[in-house]
Amino acid sequence: MSHRFKQIQPPHCYTKKEVDTLIKEAIDDAMRKHNRNASLISMTLGIIFLALFVDGFLRAIGIIPPFMDIDVNLMHQVVNQTKEEVLRVLR
């Protein structure tokens, strides 16, 4: 049986060093792809949440009009309460 090993042996056999190098390259490539995809997802989510925060903040201070008649404008309440507090202190 050992005499047939030369006949069925592939034309190129990888050495242990070559296999280790190929595995390391495959792992490095997978990590690079993972980090790139994770960064893109994080960036997208960050931009979306920042945009929603800015939208809510601008609606709360009254710069952007209400959406679907849901008024979250706080500036009128703050101004009225501050005015009442100042008038009460001045009297």
Image: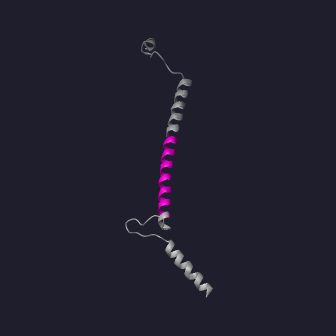
- Report x, y in % for residue 16: 55, 24
Q: Residue at x 40, y 65 (%)?
A: 67
Main secondary-structure element of the magenta-colored stretch: helix
Position above or below: 53 against 3: below
Residue 11 lies in the magenta stretch: no
The quarter of the image holding the C terminus is bottom right
Where residue 18 sits in the image (x, y, percent)? 54, 24
Q: Quadrant of residue 84?
A: bottom right
Residue ID at (59%, 81%) = 86
- 71 lies above or below 28: below
Given residues 22 and 91, the one toward you in this image is 91
The residue most toward the right is: 90
- Please give the range of residues in magenta: 34-57
Extreme residue toward the bottom, this view: 91
In front here: 31 or 10?
A: 31
Identify the residue at horizontal 49%, vertical 52% (top origin).
Answer: 47
